[in-house]
Amino acid sequence: MENIIEVKNLTKLYKKKKAIDDLSFDVYKGEILGFLGPNGSGKSTTINCILSLLNFNKGNIKIFGREMSPNAYDIKRKIGVVFQDVAVFEELTVYDNIDFFCGLYVSNNNKRKKYIEDAINLVGLQEFKKYYPKQLSGGLLRRLNIACGIAHKPEIIFLDEPTVAVDPQSRNNILEGIKKLRSDGATIIYTTHYMEEVEMICDRVIVLDKGKIIAKGTTDELKYLAKIKEKITVEAKEISNQNLNQIKQLPEVQNISYENGILKISYENEKNNLENIIDFLKNNQIKYRKIYSERPTLNDVFLELTGKELRD
Amino acid sequence: MIVYKTFLKVLNKCKFPIILYSAILLFFAGINMSSNDNTMDFTAEKPNIAVINNDKEEGITKSFLEYLHENTNIKDIKNDEQEIKDALFYREIQYIVYIPEGFSDSFLDGKNPQLEIKSTGEYQSELADMIVERYIKVAKRYRGSTDSDEELFEKIDETLSKKADVEIISKMDTKTITRLTRYFNFSAYSFIAISIYVISTILFIFKSEKINRRTIVGSIDYKKVNAKLLIANSGFCFIIWAIYFICARILIGEVAFSTYGIYFAINSLIFVICTVTLGFFVSHFVKSRNTITALINIIGLGSSFLCGVFVPMEYLPEGVLKIAHVLPAYWFVKNNELIGSTEVFSGDVIKSLVINAAVIIGFTIVFFVGSNIVTKKKMKAE
């Protein structure tokens, strides 16, 4: 696969504290790379360093095989950025905002007009072209923020937590839009602390904590890192202590918990677990309302690697 | 082009304060243009006098009375001491002449009979005194030059009837030039207010942290974007200057395009350059949109009241004018006043104008350097 971004030994210090600690990774052409980590893990700092918005203390960043610098305008031309904070002019309409930010890359008026229309269609703001930002809801504002960052049809797009505090409809719209951008050929670097989003759209994931990469790979590869392979939840009002002890002794069971009528069983293996527990419940005449099986989530992986949850 | 286009769109959303500051200029200029105009018109004045004649109305006395009728306004006052005093006190008359009994005979006999005079001592009484003195002097000169009294009176009359035509040599239209001076004085407030408002507002919006970051990651050199904003802001202020100059032509007339108008225009152009740099300097200290209004009030109104923009300099206390020396508006108004009061732009006048303009340029350099220092400090901090 073609390397489009190469980051080697990137280190950024804030005073004496390491915000990024010896980060090395590649971004491949056409993929959606997820940067997953809790707040303060170094996701935004990494992006700002890649974009030359921040100086860094050590390391090397190459984009399209060339050194990235604040004056590398030919590289910047191919990059789109959607920052975490909405950055638009309150004094301009939706259309004019996109026009300005697209105009920083595309000088041809006719070409720009088409690009603006494409961006508006992509984020679903067709009905709001003449609206001012003040008149938009939080979700629509986020969509405008995205349109401003991607209207010039960049080859690489950085999306820094674009779905923070948006309604489900806008979130779905944004995620669908991102998938569409990828299918149109863009390479996307997507930072978030929402693991569901990463699982939904990312081809590869880099998990960051305290400025360090603690894991990277596809979502399946990461999940494989977890000791737990399957989680089964049983909603049963009454399970005796004796039965709970018996469940603990079942094959492949790693751990169990029973609280407020909900039994959670973690397995080290994913073979026949559901069948075994159903048999057990039936044989011991334990009544249950619901039983379901889940695969481990990235949160489980993160929990296992760091001892804390992603949203801690 | 996109930077200029967006500049205009943002400016369009901020147009009302700009219109307001311009309306203030036109409103105040309009009010002042219609009051207290100085003129150079000349009309000979006739003083109000009274004559108490104790002589017979014949001979030289008759001739003298006719002369006084022609050259003064003789009021009918009773020969009563109290009434005469009241008339003088209430300025009904400024001067009274008592002609003694036998004045004519005595004068024609070659004697010097004395006229009794009372006056208020004011300008008009001095004028009346000059008129009386003139008659007596002429009459004395011709006395004895002829045997016939009639011939003597004719000669006196002929000499005194010669009037000097007073022609104002100055071609200076002071009334209009005073209007122009006031107009340009008032423009100081509008120039300061608009420069600070436009530049601070535009830079506050374009340089807000979020927008700035997005602009920096763009493919246009960030310095070029800044340069375009600088050109757009400065250009707009110069357009405002040009509009105000055209307004001066419309409101005040052709004189705006005369030598005076050109001097006023150059002076105001130098001042606008200064207010533009002031605007850039001040914009560094703007933390919110409300701060901009506060800065306009402090700097714009403060300068205007201290430097004779709203109240003419001659009415301002010396202490205030001393403080005003540290403000560019003072030197701008000082130059306007000098231009407005000059009839011939001699070397000395031009030298004074250049010195005042140089002080304004000095302020411009200070604001420019100050602005650069603040920018560099900010960049270092980032």
Image (cartoon, coloured by chain):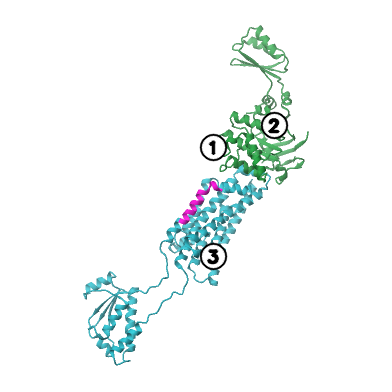
Question: Which amino acid type is marked by label 1?
Answer: Gln
- Tell me if B133 is positioned left or right of A189 in this view: left
Is residue B212 depicted above or below A43 in this figure? Answer: below
Which quadrant of the view contains residue A220? top right
Which quadrant of the view contains residue A311? top right
Q: Which chain is cyan?
A: B
Q: Which residue is mark 1?
A: A135
Residues at discs 1 and 3 both on one chain: no
Q: Considering the numbered disc 3 on the image, is that residue within a helix, a strand or a loop?
A: helix
Quarter of the image with the C terminus of chain A in it = top right
> Which residues make up the magenta segment?
B11-26
Is residue A227 depicted above or below B5 in this figure? Answer: above
Quarter of the image with the N terminus of chain A in it = top right
Q: Earlier in the sequence, mark 2 or mark 1?
A: 2
Q: How far is mark 1 from mark 3, CA to CA?
A: 49 Å
Q: How far is mark 3 from mark 2, CA to CA?
A: 67 Å
Q: Is residue B91 visible?
A: yes
- Seen as rendered, the residue at the extreme front is A110
Comparing labels 3 and 2, the label whose residue is closer to the camera = 3
- Output the chain of dot 3: B
Q: Position of residue B316 (x, y in %)?
A: 44, 61
- Output the chain of dot 1: A
